[in-house]
Amino acid sequence: MTMFQTLQPQPADGLLTLIGLFRDDPRNSKIDLGVGTYRNAAGVTPVMEAIKSAERVLLEGQQTKAYLGPEGDQRFVELLMPIAFGTSGAHAGRLVGVQTPGGGGALRLGGELITAARPGAKVWLGMPTWPNHRPVLEAAGLTVVEYRYFDPDTQSLCFDDMLAALATAEAGDVVLLHGCCHNPTGAELEPAQWDAVAALIAERGLMPFIDLAYQGLGEGLEADAYGTRRVLACVEEALVAYSCDKNFGLYRERTGALFVLSRDEAAASVVYGNLLALARVNWSMPPDHGAAAVRTILESKELRRVWRAELEGMCRRINQVREALTAAHPRLGFLSRQRGMFSQLPITPAAVAALRNDHGIYMAGSGRINLAGLQIADAEIFVGALVAVGGLPA
Ligand code: LMR
């Protein structure tokens, strides 16, 4: 037997498979509510104007493509900090960050940092969650413990279950939290609930690991950072995986950062050295282009203004689609209470398949829909198809 003959076949990634299935569907009327990319009112995932302008600046002005090092573009990392963590400077010296290949790279790097510090650490995952959370964190060496975060039948957050789960977690256990725009459910913690979770995490000595992948696409940049800032204000140590893939529309450029809060400046410096060492053995150095474009935007008052206006427009459109669906059917009222690109319909896999086969409507097998994929003019068609396959919630 040769070496590769010992390998086991792997199932294709359920979400990413949808990209090809949709592309190959010849129907003009097809609707893509699958993978989480923003679509504008013309159904296009545009390169943002601010990014285009930044790319022009880079094209003309960039003098070299020599290596930057495993930390990536440190100016990019610094400029993201006030956006994610506010301008108070409260964590000065204790907060370090490195550029990563997307939010996925940040999750993996954070997981490996935890494993290096505490081999076999547990991570608490509220279910359902992004399907890649568990595999990435397990591959980084963590042991996953699941609890119920959301009830699809009532479309509500299981906040009591969440508190009960965290109350049984032990000091040093990791708690993975979605900073905003919960993927896949769109069910957000209210500010008072964030306060309670932050207090519990601090009281029990848990390690928060916040996945902040959609800042600005729920309520706006500031409101979407509430939970992250609240938690960090209450603890000595925390990790934040940040993605620019959605709020700068950079998807395939893989642009993100991992931030780590430590107890004091000396500990932060050791953490930083460990991050560099872990990055070096993973990807050596992160790809530059996306981070360079983001840095160029954030360094320019004018490009910043353009970016913020575009982001606010994207956020508005997603919330308008939510309103349109709620208006199209009273049983979809929950959609306008949820936030971000996603909601998860309480429908069966058979209904998901019927929507795809009979109506050309694509969504994740879990019933997750990407609201940003829907044109408001198609809201009635979509709701009609949901009714036809018995896919409306009770
Ligand atoms: C999604 O959830 O659709 C995106 O984050 C894409 C991905 O990598 O799964």
Image (cartoon, grey):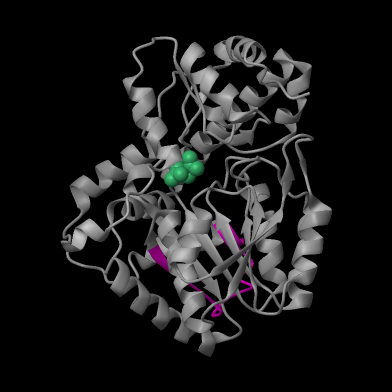
- Magenta highlight on residue 87: yes
Residue 207, percent from left and from top: 64, 73
x and y, in percent, of residue 320 in the image: 64, 24
Q: Is residue 247 visible?
A: no
Foreground residue among 77 and 121: 121
Quarter holding the N terminus?
bottom left
In the rendered image, the residue lying farthest to the bottom is 266
Task: Count how many numbered circles sit on residues in the image.
Answer: 0
Q: Is residue 357 above or below residue 71?
A: above
The magenta span reads 84-99
Q: Residue at 68% of width from left, 48% of height from top?
A: 223
Could you tell me residue 129's position as x and y percent?
60, 49
Q: Is residue 93 visible?
A: yes
- Locate residue 278: give its quadrant: bottom left
Q: Is residue 315 left or right of residue 47?
A: right
Is residue 96 depicted above or below 58 in this figure?
Answer: below
Residue displayed at 63% across by 16% down: 386
Q: Nearer the viewer, residue 249 or 128?
A: 128
Which x, y percent locates residue 197? 77, 62
Q: Quadrant of the C terminus?
A: top right
Instruction: Identify the image quadrant of residue 352.
Output: top right
Give the residue furthest to the front: 1
Is residue 211 shown left or right of residue 116? right
Identify the residue at horizontal 59%, vertical 15% (top origin): 382
Residue nearer the viewer, 41 or 124: 124
Is 261 one of the magenta-colored residues?
A: no
Going by the image, does 170 lie left or right of 220? right
Q: Where 329 sits versus 275, above or below?
A: above
